[in-house]
């Protein structure tokens, strides 16, 4: 039997395209995506299974210098994903040259002692004259050779199949680790909250994205409808005012768009009620963080 399987962690700085890549490969939206750094806040398992391979990816929060308990827990999630692995997929923004943060992440990747494949993503933004220089620089940072990298554009899927082939070729011959119809470890309840957060991240700026968290407070599965009550938690009343919008219009549009996506995921009609709550300093509060991310 030439079936290959294994665990692969996606590791990198925030905003380089780890979750975009994961969703494309798995073929389902298992991890939310936005143009704001620090979108992913806890590790997410995404499993891709075909007739010849199974890759169990762990998408991780982008590694950054944390400023609060939430940030520390995010970086800790990324670090702890570096155990019990067959491979690390080190994802970088290939259109930029490495900076100090890249060197920091690369040192962490090297220290885990697992084989590494480099994905230089955002190839669509990479200028031709920088290709060789950036490829060499990132490969050198993690100590891999010319056989171990791929240039991709995750948003369009360019070269993603080739990247998968490269990953599979590095995995051991082994039976699948998970049932073949399983594609994530995220509950529908958690995903519903994440979809709401994604809509907020897409449409807010400055400190609002980072100051916003979502908790699904109740979930009632009835015969023809699922009733969901979610709280959006912010740090300050000014942020609450932004999220409500004039006459409650902003939160209403967040609700409408989130509902469509949750309905698609569940294949069932839903009723979604959203409340915005101010909880000053919630990102330092272990109880709130547990409620949100455990
Ligand atoms: N131009 C371009 N943009 C991309 C590409 N891949 C992802 N993006 C965009 O980059 C942004 C960040 O993508 P994410 O997938 O959320 O990045 P991430 O690495 O998971 O970020 P964190 O969760 O914050 O660590 C989004 O706006 C994506 O649409 C790409 O290949 N090219
Ligand atoms: Mg992410």
Image (cartoon, grey):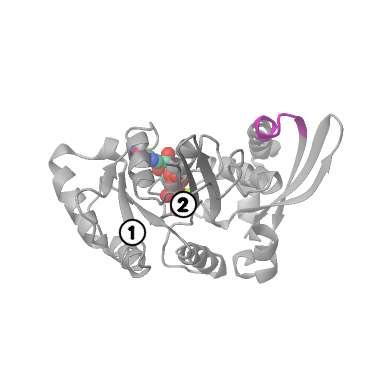
Residue linked to disc 2: 6
Q: Which residues are magenta?
A: 262-270
Residue 55, given in percent of the width and then of the height, sits at: 47, 46
Task: Determine whether the residue tagged by mark 2 lies in a helix, strand or loop.
Answer: strand
Q: Nearer the viewer, residue 236 or 256?
A: 256
Q: Is residue 175 visible?
A: yes
Above or below for 135 versus 140: above
Above or below for 247 versus 197: above
Q: Is residue 35 visible?
A: no
**Badge 1 or badge 2: first in the primary sequence:** 2
> Which residue is at 60% across, 54% downward?
212
Residue 113, given in percent of the width and then of the height, sits at: 35, 67
Q: Quadrant of the N terminus?
A: top left
Query: Marks 1 and 2, Cα distance to the nearest angstrom?
Result: 12 Å
Q: Examine the structure image and report whether residue 9 is included in the region drawn in magenta.
A: no
Above or below for 82 versus 9: below
Q: Is ligand 1 closer than 8 angstroms to the Cβ of mark 1?
A: no
Residue linked to disc 1: 115
> Which residue is at 61% across, 42% downward?
182
């Amino acid at each position: 039997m030439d079936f290959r399987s294994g665990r692969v962690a996606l590791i990198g700085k925030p905003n380089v395209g780890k979750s975009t890549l994961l969703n494309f490969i798995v073929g389902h939206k298992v991890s939310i995506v936005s143009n704001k750094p620090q979108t992913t806040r806890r590790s997410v398992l995404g499993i891709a299974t075909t007739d010849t391979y199974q890759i169990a990816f762990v998408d991780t929060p982008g590694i950054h210098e944390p400023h609060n308990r939430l940030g520390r827990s995010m970086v800790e999630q990324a670090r702890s994903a570096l155990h019990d692995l067959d491979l690390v997929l080190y994802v970088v923004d290939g259109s930029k040259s490495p900076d100090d943060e890249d060197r920091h992440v690369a040192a962490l990747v090297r220290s885990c002692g697992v084989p590494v494949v480099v994905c230089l993503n955002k190839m669509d933004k990479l200028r031709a004259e920088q290709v060789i220089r950036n490829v060499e620089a990132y490969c050198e940072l993690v100590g891999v050779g010319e056989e171990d990298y791929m240039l991709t554009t995750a948003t369009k899927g360019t070269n993603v199949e080739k990247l998968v082939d490269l990953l599979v070729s590095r995995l051991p011959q082994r039976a699948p680790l998970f049932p073949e119809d399983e594609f994530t470890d995220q509950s529908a309840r958690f995903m519903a909250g994440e979809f709401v957060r994604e809509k907020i991240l897409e449409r807010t700026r400055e400190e609002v994205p980072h100051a916003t968290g979502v908790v699904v407070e109740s979930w009632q599965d009835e015969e023809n409808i699922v009733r969901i009550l979610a709280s959006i938690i912010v740090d300050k009343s000014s942020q609450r005012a932004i999220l409500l919008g004039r006459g409650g219009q902003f939160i209403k549009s967040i609700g409408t768009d989130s509902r469509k996506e949750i309905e698609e995921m569940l294949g069932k009609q839903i009723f979604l009620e959203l409340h915005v709550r101010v909880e000053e300093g919630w990102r330092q509060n272990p109880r709130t963080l547990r409620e949100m991310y455990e």
